Image (cartoon, coloured by chain):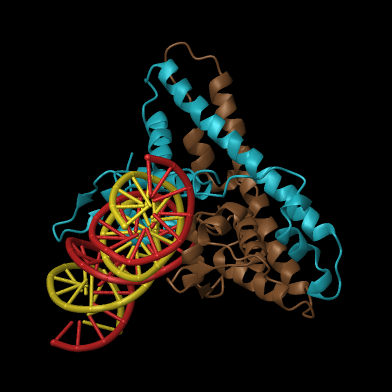
Chain colours: A brown, B cyan, C yellow, D red
Amino acid sequence: MQPASLSIGTLARLADVKVPAIRFYEVIGLLPTPHRTDSNRRIYGSDDVRRLSFIKHARQLGFRVDAVRALLALSDDPDRPCEEANALAAEQLADVEARINRLEALRSELRRMIDAACNGRTGDCRVIEVLGDHDLCADEHGQPLTLSSA
Amino acid sequence: MQPASLSIGTLARLADVKVPAIRFYEVIGLLPTPHRTDSNRRIYGSDDVRRLSFIKHARQLGFRVDAVRALLALSDDPDRPCEEANALAAEQLADVEARINRLEALRSELRRMIDAACNGRTGDCRVIEVLGDHDLCADEHGQPLTLSSA
DNA sequence: CCTACACCCTCTAGCGACTAGAGGATCAAG
DNA sequence: CTTGATCCTCTAGTCGCTAGAGGGTGTAGG
């Protein structure tokens, strides 16, 4: 494998990831340290395109870097049981579903506010209640939003 | 109102928010500067509990601090002219709906990944396979997840 | 051959929204 | 009167990048 010999910019275009992000992924160990040309430029191959696309896709799905690392390790070693991968995905799914539920509660409240004809004053704005009252939450909602859990 | 006189630690427990986060919210203007005791300690009341709970929930839902500020302003001033409030609410509603759509796309893809039964090795794992090949995705889920697009 | 310009290199700093820790003051209980 | 919890301010670290400075290199046209 590794037929092509790609510059970092070409790799970036192929995987639709920005150049500095590729260097960043190298630093944090998601991508292997690539070979270099005589003039110190990074050289990549098609395996790197695949790996980087994998990373990008996983990140888009909201997996955090540690989870991506775990998933990459799993995909690197096809003989490992895939329960681990399923568990990671299930965890991610639960997270997404919890967020959807809460957003739907907020959506209906915002709609209610807007639909309520108000001639003059905002009146009985219940936004703060919807967001302030824990009991209105359908589910447990443990962790606050972070970049990765977004 | 403001019957009770709460320490920052008590407020933190009541709203389930960490103490330094409360001080941070004060600095960035989400919480009003509280009164102090003679020995310079912050004193809070029940309004602050409500406000802080609101902030916490809004943040969990992925609203940026700026949006939380706007929502707070909306609920702070019931005499505010309707158009302004409606515009603000509509803006937030659009934001929430976009977020829901995005999360629903993620959810269906995660479900598809998980539902494809793979009981064995990662080599056959659907999760890994899907992550590697974007063409296997049913939906568009183009943009990377950020705090705001959560 | 020279120049222009796109690309590459490393390094540091910045973002949002906190969190963690240092180093010190104060309070409430025993 | 001491102990330990809590409070204060301040700085630095976290995550996952992004932006920019300040320089080297590779290539295409004149």
* A48 or B19: nearer the viewer: A48
Q: Is residue A50 left or right of residue B123?
A: left
Tell me if C15 is positioned left or right of C27 in this view. right
- Residue A108 in sight in this render: yes
**Of the pair A85 and B57, the residue shown nearer to us:** A85
Q: Is residue A19 left or right of residue A57?
A: left
Q: In the depicted view, which residue is nearer to us: A7 or B64? A: A7
Q: Position of residue B142 (x, y in %)?
A: 63, 45
Residue beneath the point at 56% across and 30% down: B94
Quadrant for the N terminus of chain B, please.
top left
Question: Which residue occupies 66% across, 65% down?
Answer: A46
Rendering coords of residue A4 (x, y %)? 65, 65
In percent of the image, x 75 and y 58: which residue is there? B130
- Give the percent coordinates (x, y) of residue B28: 29, 47
- On screen, residue A38 versus residue A143, left or right, reads left
Q: Compared to A38, does A94 lie above or below?
A: above
Is residue A119 shown above or below B50?
above
Position of B7 relative to A129 (above/below) = below
Q: Residue at x 81, y 73 (%)?
A: B123
Residue A85 screen position, x and y as percent: 73, 69
| Residue A123 visible | no
So how many labels did they put on this image?
0
Say which of A86 and C30 sits in front: A86
* Quadrant in which residue B65 is drawn: top left
Q: In which quadrant of the rendered view does residue A73 lie?
A: bottom right
